[in-house]
Image: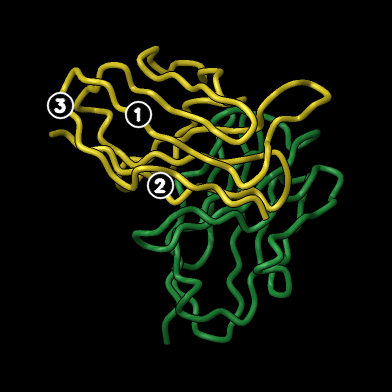
Amino acid sequence: QLQLQESGPGLVKPSETLSLTCTVSGGSISNYYWSWIRQPPGKALEWIGFIYSSGTTTYNPSLKSRVTISLDTSKNQFSLKLSSVTAADTAVYYCARDGNGDYWGQGTLVTVSS
Amino acid sequence: DIVMTQSPDSLAVSLGERATINCKSSQSVLYSSDNKNYLAWYQQKPGQPPKMLIYWASTRESGVPDRFSGSGSGTDFTLTISSLQAEDVAVYYCQQYYTTPRTFGQGTKVEIK
């Protein structure tokens, strides 16, 4: 059974870079797209971007200038970096496999505050 | 971007009654080469990640009760809960995965009347 788990700091200071990692277990990263999605408290879901197993990335234009998604196939992990964060970036961040199939992490709350 | 608009924003339904949620996309999500609608429905309960219920607009994910059904094509879609159970109280989202950026509806909150 494929499982995903987010990890990273729960508190980030304004103007700094948010960094999260998603570890995929129970299956291979190969031949799929792997997404980051976020949800501000009490609000709807927002797609941040994804990475294919080859390393090709696609980002949401609304965040593109600040986002980097990368892959470490040797560890079956993919990562998110979001730079120059503000309070508006406070959200639960989820990693997920794109497309059909219910494969999401449990989510991790990241708060941006000094 | 494809804008996904759900209606209503919330609804209250009696136990055992039908609940209907609508989702409209600003452009078609029907892929002509395979005749599939790239539209999914999710259920989210408080403190939990979204759970995929339906993909390709009408295919139930494994393990999802058959009281959940999806219909529609092109730009107009519906999620129906045929007989609402207490455990169905949640927020429901539609999502298009026809193109990037992937986009979600604003959510519909389902409660018990």
Colour of chain A in the image:
green
Determine which quarter of the picture holds residue B86.
top left
User: In x, y percent, where is residue A32?
Assistant: 75, 36
Left or right of B12, for residue B26: right
Which numbered circle lies on residue B20? 1
- On residue B14, the disc is 3
Q: Is residue A1 above or below residue A104?
A: above
Q: Secondary structure at mark 3?
A: loop
Q: Is residue A113 left or right of residue B40?
A: left
- Decide: is B111 above or below B9: above
- Chain letter of disc 2 in the image: B
Residues at marks 2 and 1, CA–CA distance in whole angstroms: 13 Å
**Mark 3 vs mark 2: which is more N-terminal?**
3
- Asked if disc 3 and disc 2 are in contact, CB closer than 8 Å, the reply is no
Indicate the colour of chain B. yellow
**Residue at label 2?**
B107
Q: Establish whether labels 3 and 1 are both on one chain.
A: yes
The colour scheme of the drawn protein is by chain
Q: Nearer the viewer, residue A18 or A48?
A: A48
**Residue for point 68% across, 38% down:** B28
As measured in the structure, the alpha-carbon distance from the residue carrying label 3 to the one carrying label 2 is 20 Å
Which residue corresponds to the image point at 58% horizontal and 83% vertical from the top-left?
A16
**Is residue B19 shown left or right of residue A50?**
left
Given residues B24 and A76, the one toward you in this image is B24
- Quadrant into which the N terminus of chain B falls: bottom right
Q: Amino acid at mark 1?
A: Thr
